[in-house]
Image (cartoon, helix red, strand yellow):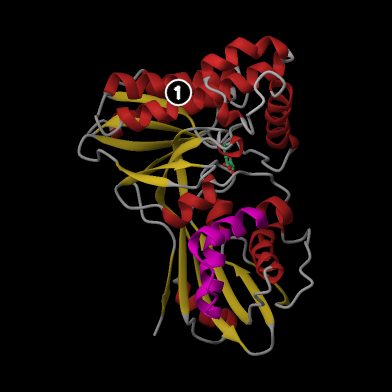
Amino acid sequence: MNLMQQFQRIYDSKPALRATAPGRVNLIGEHTDYNDGFVMPVAIQYAVTILAAPRDDGRIRLFSADFGQSTEFAAAGPIERDPRFPWSHYEKGVVSEFLKLGSAPRGADLLIHGNVPMASGLSSSAAVEVATAVALRAMNGFGIGDLDLIRLCQRAENEFVGMKCGIMDQFISCLGRSGHAMFLDCRSLEYRLIPFPSGRYSVVILNTRMKRELTGSEYNERRSQCEEGVRLLRPALPGIRALRDVPPGEFEKHAAALPELVARRCRHVVCENQRVLDFVQALPASDEARIGSLLLDSHASLRDLYEVSCPELDLMVELSMSVPGVVGARMTGAGFGGCAVAVVEKGREEALRSRVMEGYPKKTGIEPEVYFSSPSDGAKAEALE
Ligand code: GLA
């Protein structure tokens, strides 16, 4: 049964609107977004789709086709968490943020389906938030612009879900462009679309299938270690607001003022920001040696300094680099499991896939998944007739 048929079966009506929002893979710039830094993600072909129809009784009903569960609540609030349906917190968080802005949505029936692998570092949660927000915007005629919608989705995750994520995932899910990577300044929110050299390289995503628990304390703890670093550096560097303001050379002059662990965390961030700036030059120039070393340096830094990799991710990178034609690889997303990303010469994708499909289970006992995806478009909503 396709989604339209499912919608009709569940709600006994036809959907009026379809919204989609993609997941993402981050090429480089990891754990920099919440430090006001730089990132370079691409939107992927895996996405969340929402079918929606308005209702007249002020109720919002949600059906998750992936969990096979339904829940409903009053569109006017109060919006509450429901431990029986944790998947619904992303949609509810978005409704709750619209209400805070004084934009009360009308009632609606929503069917949600995603093929973005969940808890894998490919931003399935941001895709749900952005798809919900563009669906509600279209259905209610809300005048909110893309930037404010992106911030709203981030707040939904920060406040309703409790994950203190940065803005990268919602940003790329909303504004990604087919054939392009996005170079985003997470402070000014200015961005540049960088043509991905698709004639020469492919992006291959390698899923360790080690699930992460993102709202777990590790992510938020890294974030506060960075903030502590800024606090402790400020007496020596009074102008700084975030690690973004500290060039690597300056950082090393003052790193001794920091506890050893905080210094390592901060060193990752300040150097990773510089790597993004270098990558922005290297990618369009197809400077293979540079692309490769930046990706590998990023991985080593996430493994050794930021300590968010894991043996399975390290193995993915190692296996990838043993395949001729793989330019570079690194873990992607928050870490602690999830996916690695590889930039691969065109035509070498299958060689990488077979190496991983064979080598990874031998050492881990886990069947990995491998995805090919060209850079894709961001979110959209369309009326259905
Ligand atoms: C998660 C967060 C992002 C970002 C990455 C790490 O995906 O949602 O905001 O911090 O981790 O780069």
Q: Nearer the viewer, residue 270 or 176?
A: 270
How many discs mark residues in the rendered view? 1
What main secondary structure does the magenta stretch of the protein show?
helix
Residue 365 is situated, as x and y percent measured from the top left of the image, at 55, 28
Q: Which residue is mark 1?
A: 317
Q: Does 341 sit left or right of 93 as displayed?
A: left
Q: Where residue 38 sits in the image (x, y, percent)?
A: 49, 36
Above-or-below relation of 265 to 31:
above
* SS at circle 1: helix
Q: In x, y percent, where is residue 61?
A: 66, 76
Q: Is residue 289 left or right of residue 206?
A: left
Q: Which residues are magenta?
A: 129-156
Q: Is residue 152 above or below residue 236?
A: below
* Res 357 quadrant in image: top left
Q: Is residue 136 magenta?
A: yes
Q: Nearer the viewer, residue 360 or 151?
A: 151
- Amino acid under disc 1: Val
